[in-house]
Structures are given as C-alpha cells and as structure tokens.
Amino acid sequence: MSCGRKLDALNFVLADVRDGLGPYLAIYLLTVQHWDQASIGLVMSVAGIAGIVAQTPAGALVDSTTAKRAILIAAAAVVTVGSLALPWMPNFTGVAVMNVFTGAAGSLFAPSLAAITLGIVGPRAFARRIGRNEAFNHAGNAAAAAIAAATAYWLGPVVVFWIMSILALASIAVTISIPADAIDHAKARGLETGAGHSRDQPSGITVLLSSRPLLIFAVCTTIFHFANAAMLPLVGQKLALINKESGTSLMAICIVAAQVVMVPVTMIVAAKVDAWGRKPIFLAAFAILALRGFLYPLSENAYWLVGVQLLDGFGAGIFGALFPVIVRDIVGGSGRFNVSVGAIATAQGVGASLSAAVTGYVVVSMGYSTAFWMLACIAATGFGVFLLAMPETSPDSARSNAVVRVA
C-alpha cells in the first residue's frame, strides 16, 4: 500500500478519535447520568481548557522531533484508555480528570497529521492532499456515526465509547505501517532549504506574534469555533429531550448527514482553492455558520433539526480543508509550521471551550432558542472581521503581498 493510501486510511480511522466524544458525551451525561446542561457544558470545557494549554507546546514538540509517528500512537493510546474508563466514572471529578488527559492528548493530532502529510507530499501538493485528508476524515466520521446510530438503540449511549476505542487501536496500527523514512522532517516542519531558499534554520518562535495575518487568523478561528462548537451538542440535547430512547441514534444521524456533505465539499475546496482564493471560500463558511444558528430555533421537529445540521457539512468542511493551508501560506519556509498550527488550534480551543461553557448557562437561564441566536450573531461578527481584516494568503494572488513574511 502506498503512503498516500496509508494517509487515506489513517485519516479515516482517526476521524472519530481526533474529534473526541463531544456531543456523544453530552448525550450520555444528560440521559444516563442525568446531569444538567450547565454541568455538561462545564465538564466539556475542562477538556477544551486542557487542549488550549497543550496545543502550542504540542505543535512545538512536533516541529522539534522526528518521532512524529510515536506522538500519534501515544495520543491514540490515551484516548483509548479514556474511552474505556469514562463509562465507569459517574461523578463530575472523575469525568473532568479523564477529560483533561484526553483533551491534552487530542491536541497532538492536528499538528502531527499536518506534519506527517507535509513531510510526505511536500509543499506543492499540500493544499490538495489536505483536502483529501479531510474528505477521508469526514467519511470516517460518517461511518463511525452510522455504526453508532445502528447500535445505540439496542446497546445504549455507552456504545460510542467502545467504537472510539476500536478506532483508536486501528489508528495505531495504520500509523505503524507508515515507513519512518517516508517523512522528510525538514519539510514536515515547513522548512525549505537548499538552492533557491534563503533559510537553512527555523525562524525564531516570535513568528507567532510578529505575523499580523497569523494573529488575525487566530482571532477569526476563535470566533468561528465559539459560534460553532456548541451548536451540535445543543441539537443533540434537544433531540434527546424529544426522545430519550433515540437521542444518541438521532445525534449519529445528524453527524452522518453533515459528514456525508463534507466529503464532496472538501474535495471541491481542495480542487478550487488556488483558483478561487482562500478568502472568499472561508467567508462562505462564516456565512453558512450564521445561517445555521438562525434556522435551528424555527422548529423543534427532529427532521428540521437534522436537515439544518446538513449545513454544517459546508461550513465545517470548508474550515477543515483551509485551516492548515492558510497557516502554511503565512509561515511557509519558516520552519515553524507545526507550532503555528498548534497556536491556531489553541485559538480554536479557546473558542470551543468558551462556547460550551457560555451556551450551557444561556440555555439554563434563557432557553435553547436564545443560545442559538447568540451563536448566530457571533458567527456574523466573525464574517465581518474576516472580510475587513484578513488578507488573501494565496501565493498566486497579487494581494499576497499583504502577508507579513516572517523574519
């Protein structure tokens, strides 16, 4: 099997593992452990905070080591242990502590996968390969969610913990199968050396603070995930309250529907991102996210909620396909690609963590509709910020001169 096929397989089996239990954990705590929404939001935020603390150091670690496969394997092992242990931890403290470990481990997936991909295919093929990665990631999510939907009705919400454990173990096996010498570790960290390149050593870590486009993108990423992260868990809670017996299956259907849409979306983005430019495509993701927030409260019908969730396939699919590409545009050649990915993932974690905590309290005090409208307004704000402040980063665009080149 070629390295390209192994990357396909790795992204497929790692899909559910890297995204975490998320909305499934929320449904389990609501319907089985009978927690209130505020407590659920808080414990989910704990994992987010752990990820926030770990993301940038995780990227720096991936930049500095040649043991990138070992990092992925270790992270998957921690997630496996967490998935097996969580059903046996009914109290807040136990769940929170385990979420700290799995959240920190989860911070290693994005920079490790991006680094291994860049190290194998190189910078010229990176944008298209990332789109393919995301397509297989979404296909894997859809497959796992379909299995959960088919089995949760009979085995209960706890089945998702076993599914994630199996997938984590499978990801370890696929990672081991990738030859160590297939990864160019200089390219994997975004360092371009030799003839025609001016840099033989990585730039200073101040790249994270000296690049204005990177800082703007970090702010926009925070806003995007503040608006997006809580939407699916809130939909899952509403579905569970409508029908407790089918809550997990309906949530899985929501995820399958969105993931199925994401597969062609990411492939189209990968094929057209150079021709269309990064900025207009990313603006479309913000617009679709705002639309979702305004549409959810219009009906409590389960079919309506699942239908609106299809839009997540467009917004999240675009974000996943463009996020590492835009970072590569900004810091390419600096040798600080993975720490920059980690820094932007930190911003993503800040937004997601705040989203879970804030919306949990908004739901308790003002209801689900108000929470959705709040998230929609935040997404609309992000659209404005990205439109007005973020430059086009495509290397082929005349506007790419606006990008601050790292020293």
Image (cartoon, helix red, strand yellow):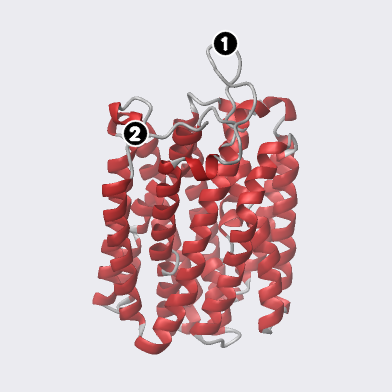
263 versus 368 height, above or below: above
**What residue type is disc 2 on?**
Ala
Give the residue at x 68% y 54%: 168
- For label 2, the SS is helix
In contact (CB < 8 Å): disc 1 and disc 2 = no
User: What residue is shown with label 1?
Assistant: 195
Quarter of the figure that contains the N terminus:
top right
Mark on residue 366? none
Nearer the observer, 287 or 58: 58
Give the residue at x 63% y 42%: 112
Quarter residue 384 falls in? bottom left
Q: Crowding at label 2, few (<14), some or many (≥20) Cα neighbours within 10 Å? A: some
Residue with the most extreme top position: 195
Quarter residue 182 falls in? top right
49 versus 272 height, above or below: below
User: What residue is shown with label 2?
Assistant: 402
Instruction: Specify whether 220 is left or right of 293.
Output: right
- For label 1, the SS is loop
**What residue type is disc 1 on?**
Ala
Instruction: Specify whether 396 is left or right of 49.
Output: left
- Total label count? 2
| CA separation in Å, label 1 and label 2 | 26 Å
45 versus 289 height, above or below: below
Dot in front, 1 or 2: 2
Quarter residue 147 falls in? bottom right
Instruction: Specify whether 43 is left or right of 177.
Output: left
Nearer the observer, 323 or 69: 323
Give the residue at x 59% y 36%: 336
Q: Position of residue 383 (x, y in %)?
A: 29, 55
Q: Position of residue 109 (x, y in %)?
A: 62, 49
